[in-house]
Each structure stands twice: as C-alpha cells, then as structure tokens.
Amino acid sequence: MIFDISNYVQGTGSLIISLICLKRYRDKPNYIKVLGFYGLNSVVFTLFQEISALFFENQHIDTLAHAYVLLECILLSFLYYLIISNKRFRKVIVFSVLLYCTIYIFSFLFFSKSAHSIIRSVRDLQMIIFSMAYFFYLLHELSEDNLMRFPMFWINSATLVFFSGTFILSYFREYIIAMIGDGIADYWTFRNFFRFAFCLVLAYAGWLNLQSIRAQKSG
C-alpha cells in the first residue's frame, strides 16, 4: 500500500515540476524550459509503466526504466550545458554524455547482469560532478547577490543531494537487495519518497523563476 502511494507521490512531484516550469513558456529561460521537459519526461514514463503493469503484466517495466535513465542523464546534462557559457565546460559536458552513452550500450552488451546498477551509478556520478563543478563556477562568478532567490542554486543543490544519495543506492543495489530480501518494496518506497522531495525542490526553483517573471511584467 505504502509502496503504491510512493509511486503516485513521485509522479505527482514530476507533474508539479512540468506545470510550474512550462507555464508562461515563452517567457522562461531555456534551462527552466529543459527542467519543465525533464518533469514531463518523468510523467510520461510513469504513465508508460502503469500501462505496462495493467496490460502487459510488467513485461516492459525494466526496459522503460532503463530508457528513462538515459533520457534523464541527457536532459539534465543539457540543462548544465545551457546554464554555463564556458566553452571548455560545455565540451566536457558533450564528451561526458557521449561517454555515458557508450558505457550504457556496452553495459547491456557485456555486463547485462550488472547493467542496471552500472548505468545508474555512472549517471549519478556524472550529475554529482556537474553539480560540484557548477558550485565552483558560481563561487567564481558570483553573479547573484541573493543566492537563495536564484533558481539554479536550488536546482544544483537538489541535484547534488539527490544523486549523491541515489549513487549509494545504485552502487550497492545488489548488496542491499540481497540483505533485505523480501523487503525490496521498502527499498523502492524510500527511493520514491526521496525523489518526491527532490521534485519539490526543483518545483520551488521553477516557482522562483515564475515569480521573477511576474515581477518584471508588473514592474
């Protein structure tokens, strides 16, 4: 019961992100638009998983989840690509995405039993590196007087905390599952609620941007 609730809760979090970040679409900066599509992407994949469960007896659940991981990595990497204008950093991002795609393919070709953990651990590590690099970039530039009102500060903080947590869960997934046995539902329940908190922070970042747009229009 709690597991089912956690599934719907994390889907709701993604929906909130997409609704806030895609509202007044034309006025939004590109990185907020990408964040909106990131939330929408999560909603679509959640719906596909529900369809798979209802009509195909969960036959395609893993395939959908693996495809989502790849798209998540690409979308969030693109967000960082847009927010930082440094050419060297952008080249690193492009290279990292291409490298991830290569690892993704080779994982399923040669390490199929561990592919689930590999593709998620590498994705998490990539997001951690990007978020830490952005914090150094932000400290160097200091373009914002009030960081607490800066949407990207919240996006980056949420990314660092969430993917640091999921990196541990992904890396030790097989060990954790072996230890908890029949309690695998508890593992996913915790992860779903953890993701919901992540989504709320991203939605707050989108709301800050929306408030800024409204203030500019009224001013």
Image (cartoon, rainbow, N blue to C red):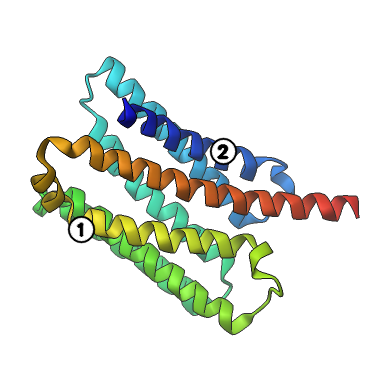
Q: Position of residue 14 (x, y in %)?
A: 49, 39
Q: Residue at x 35, y 65 (%)?
A: 126
Is residue 82 at all visible to an observer of this figure? yes
Q: Residue at x 23, y 59 (%)?
A: 103
Q: Residues within 10 Å of mark 1 (few under 14, many from 20)?
A: some
Residue picked out by circle 2:
16
Q: Quadrant of the N terminus?
A: top left
Residue 214 location, x and y as percent? 81, 49
* Residue ID at (73%, 42%): 24
Q: Mark on residue 171?
A: 1
Element assignment for label 2: helix
- Residue 5 versus residue 69 in the image, above or below: above
Q: Of residues 90 and 80, which is closer to you in this image?
A: 80
Q: Work out whether mark 1 precedes mark 2 in sequence or the reverse, and give the earlier one.
A: 2
Residue 96 position in % (x across, y down): 35, 67
> Residue 41, relative to residue 137: is it above or below?
above
Asked which quadrant contains residue 68, the reply is top left
For label 2, count other residues whose C-alpha is less than 10 Å away and answer few (under 14), some (14-19) or many (20+).
many
- Callout 1, which amino acid? Tyr
| 113 up-or-down from 52: above or below | below
